[in-house]
Amino acid sequence: MRILIVEDEKGLNEALKAILEKSGYVTDSAYNGTDGLDFALSGIYDLIILDIMLPKISGLAILGELRQSGVSTPVLLLTAKSEVEDKIKGLDTGADDYLTKPFDTGELLARVRALTRRKGEIMDDELRYGDLCLRRSTQELSRGSSSIRLGFKEFQLLEILIMNKNQIVLKDTLCEKVWGPEDGSEYNNVEVYISFLRKKLSHLHSEVTIKSARNLGYTMEGGEK
């Protein structure tokens, strides 16, 4: 699951990044409103943590632009205690929740979990499809009594494919969600990791397969009878 942090205070941005990544989330950071808006409009994020007071473009202006552009990604606003009016404006503009600075780490993570669940993500530790079980906490893939540990990017790719089972997931989507919007990874990176995953499915003797849709992307099949 990928989260965008738009916060101009570098220390806080880095602290948020550390907290979220320790809890298993993938993060990208923006330190001003212009970059934050560009990242957010990509539509690849599962949640956006957005400070109201930002250089170049304010958080409220970013939020308004996102909602006008049809981006429905959940937004958690970061506000100061004195910004009561901005909290109201933010909720009216389309924010899903707000958190007052300074905040407790436990409260932050609870709100993140609530907002990502609201979007419909499956947040159980075990993600199942066909004869496979993918454990988020250990990045372990198993079939029956056999199991194998996945690398981080393998895990991210497989999680996306399982959550979009029986649907074609575009290579562009996989590149952006796993490597990020600014990485510039070529498609062959995706192909290499898909090859790794296929070998591990074969090693587990799974009935599930990863099918290629020529010039488009990939889909998981074989998990439903």
Image (cartoon, helix red, strand yellow):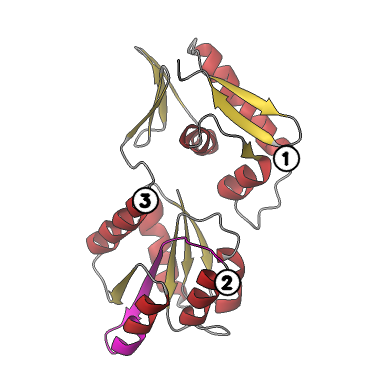
Label 2 crowd (10 A; few <14 / some 14-19 / many >=20)? many
Q: Is residue 86 above or below residue 190?
A: below
Query: What is the residue that sits farthest to the top in this orientation?
Result: 205
Circle count: 3
The residue that label 3 is drawn on is 22
The residue that label 2 is drawn on is 37
Question: Decide: marks 1, 3 in contact (CB < 8 A)?
Answer: no
SS of the residue at dot 2? Answer: helix
> Closest to the observer: 50 or 192?
50
SS of the residue at dot 3? Answer: helix
The kind of residue on which mark 3 rests is Lys
The residue that label 1 is drawn on is 187
Q: Residue at x 33, y 81 (%)?
A: 87
The kind of residue on which mark 1 rests is Tyr
Residue 189 coordinates in the image, percent (x, y): 69, 38
**In the picture, residue 188 is in which quadrant?**
top right
Q: Residue at x 67, y 40 (%)?
A: 171
Q: Which residues are magenta?
A: 70-87
Task: State the CA–CA distance, disc 1 to disc 3.
Answer: 28 Å
Label 3 crowd (10 A; few <14 / some 14-19 / many >=20)? few
Q: Is residue 185 above or below residue 94?
A: above
Task: State the CA–CA distance, disc 2 to disc 1.
Answer: 25 Å
Residue 92 coordinates in the image, percent (x, y): 37, 78
Question: Decide: marks 2, 3 in contact (CB < 8 A)?
Answer: no
Q: Viewer-nearest of labels 2 and 1?
A: 2
